């Protein structure tokens, strides 16, 4: 009886270690989200960038919307990809 | 970008201008916009100066991270969504509409 409970204890410990190990691995495989350099509440740095409207390059700056409207600036990785 | 296009009317009604930004050329972005039916500007950060200044340049892809910034009329950042969270614009649309109601 005593022997059996000891082997159960050993088995339990082994399982706990195995579980902890796999858990740690699962966490490690998830790429850590890098903190953002520019944070909520800060003033967004101004920029001036072009887009092509079909006939001309047009310049847009962030500051042109100051006091007029909110702006969503949506950075995306590449053209012709999803999202 | 498509998801923002689908919500564009709501965003415009809440005084919000949408600007897409990538490091593609302005011409590639225009072709992309036409292909997926986007009517708001897709800006070209050719060379990545703005992307780097915003701290979201990915060396691995030589491209920006996927990030949405919602910027208020005072120029301050109200919301940020990063990577996979940045695909669904619902949160931004909600934030804009909330803001409009609170005024």
Image (cartoon, coloured by chain):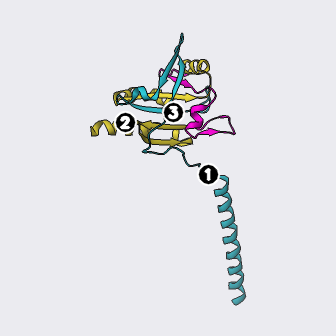
Chain colours: A cyan, B yellow
Residue A34, given in percent of the width and then of the height, sits at 59, 48
- Residue B74 disc label: 2
On screen, residue B62 versus residue B92, left or right, reads: right
Category of crowding for the residue at label 2, using alpha-carbon neighbours closer than 10 angstroms: few (below 14), some (14–19), many (at least 20): some
On screen, residue B47 versus residue A50, left or right, reads: right
Measured in 3D between alpha carbons, the distance from the residue under mark 3 to the one under mark 2, in whole angstroms, is 18 Å
Where, by quadrant of the figure, is residue A69 drawn? top left
- Residue assigned mark 3: A74
Looking at the figure, which quarter contains the N terminus of chain A?
A: bottom right
Magenta segment, which residues? B36-65
- Residue A32 disc label: 1
Q: SS for tag 1?
A: loop
- Residue B40 disc label: none
Q: Is residue B1 visible?
A: no
Q: Is residue B2 visible?
A: yes
Q: Chain of mark 3?
A: A
Residue B39, given in percent of the width and then of the height, sits at 48, 20
Q: Chain of mark 2?
A: B
Q: Which residue occupies 68% across, 76% down?
A: A13
Residue B32, given in percent of the width and then of the height, sits at 58, 21
First of labels 1, 3 by sequence position:
1
Residue B21, given in percent of the width and then of the height, sits at 54, 29
Q: SS for tag 2?
A: loop
């Amino acid at each position: 009886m005593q022997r059996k409970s000891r082997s159960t204890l050993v088995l339990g410990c082994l399982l706990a270690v195995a579980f902890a190990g796999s858990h740690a691995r699962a966490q490690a495989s998830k790429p850590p989200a890098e903190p953002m350099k520019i944070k909520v509440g800060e003033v967004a740095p101004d920029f001036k960038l072009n887009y092509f409207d079909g006939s001309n390059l047009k310049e847009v700056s962030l500051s042109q919307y100051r006091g007029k409207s909110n702006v969503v600036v949506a950075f995306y990785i590449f053209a012709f990809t999803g999202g | 970008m498509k998801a923002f296009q689908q919500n564009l009317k709501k965003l415009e009604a809440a005084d919000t201008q949408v600007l897409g930004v990538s490091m593609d050329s302005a011409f590639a972005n225009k072709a992309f916009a036409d292909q997926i039916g986007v009517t708001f500007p897709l800006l070209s950060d050719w060379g990545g100066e703005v992307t780097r200044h915003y701290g979201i340049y990915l060396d691995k892809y030589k491209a920006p991270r996927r990030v949405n910034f919602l910027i208020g009329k005072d120029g301050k950042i109200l919301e940020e969504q990063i990577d996979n969270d940045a695909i669904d614009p619902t949160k931004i649309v909600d934030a804009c509409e909330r803001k409009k109601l609170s005024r």
